[in-house]
Image (cartoon, grey):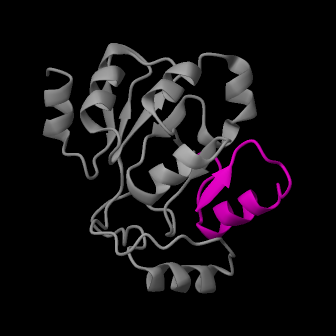
Amino acid sequence: MVHDLRRRRQPHRLPGHLHGKQRPQNKPLAFVVPHLDRARELLDLTPDAERLAAAFWPGDLALFLPWRHQHDADRYHVVGSPALTTHAPGPLGDLASAFPGLLAATTVNVSGDGGPDDHGPAITLTEVDDFLATTGLDALVMDGGICPAANHLTIVDCTSPDTRLVRAGLVHPRAINAAIGQ
């Protein structure tokens, strides 16, 4: 599900989507940047964040990054402060590149912990439709085909010089360590 961070025409929809996903309000959506330079304009990237972005963006990695300016953190609170940030490949990345605003996104599934019993995100249009019907949510759906990975983004905290893995996902922890020289 994708949300325009600059529009406030339908502010009632976002809380409904979070409720339908059973997503805690303090769990941020992913801020989808169209390219690395846009991330650099809005966020502070540590040297490790730069290395990780160079190695895995666009890709299946999200980074917690601090905002450059407090007014952006206040304005875009749905992606958190620090901001959970990714540069996505495929249709979502194409949408972020073509879209004039800022996008926040989340996977189509009930919010979970990414553990072994977590069903994970929807990977087919049928699963998306089933989720929307079950939760009573409505959404504009862009069919990007079957997703080959039923796993989550890897999340790394890059808010300080002590970079740490928050959640393992599609990018293996050893790949993270290799990219930052550990």
Name the spot of residue 6 as percent of width and height, x first: 75, 42
Q: Furthest residue to the right?
A: 9
When asked about the image quadrant of residue 55, the answer is top left
Figure disc tally: 0
Name the spot of residue 98 as percent of width and height, x first: 57, 48
Q: Going 67% across and 64% down the picture, which residue do you hit?
A: 17
Q: Furthest residue to the front?
A: 98
**Of residues 139 and 137, which is closer to you in this image?**
139
Name the spot of residue 72 as percent of width and height, x first: 69, 26
Residue 6 part of the magenta segment = yes
Q: Going 58% across and 72% down the picture, which residue do you hit?
A: 141
When asked about the image quadrant of residue 123, the answer is bottom left
Residue 166 part of the magenta segment = no
The reply to whether residue 156 is visible in this rendering is yes
The reply to whether residue 30 is visible in this rendering is no
**Left or right for 106, reference 48:** right
**Left or right for 93, reference 171:** right
Name the spot of residue 94 as percent of width and height, x first: 48, 52
Magenta stretch, residue numbers:
1-27
Which quarter of the figure is the C terminus placed in?
A: top left
Q: Going 60% across and 54% down the picture, which residue do you hit?
A: 24
Q: Is residue 149 above or below residue 156?
A: below
Which quarter of the figure is the N terminus placed in?
A: bottom right
Q: Going 55% across and 28% down the picture, which residue do you hit?
A: 82
**Left or right for 123, reference 4:** left
Q: Is residue 139 above or below residue 40?
A: below
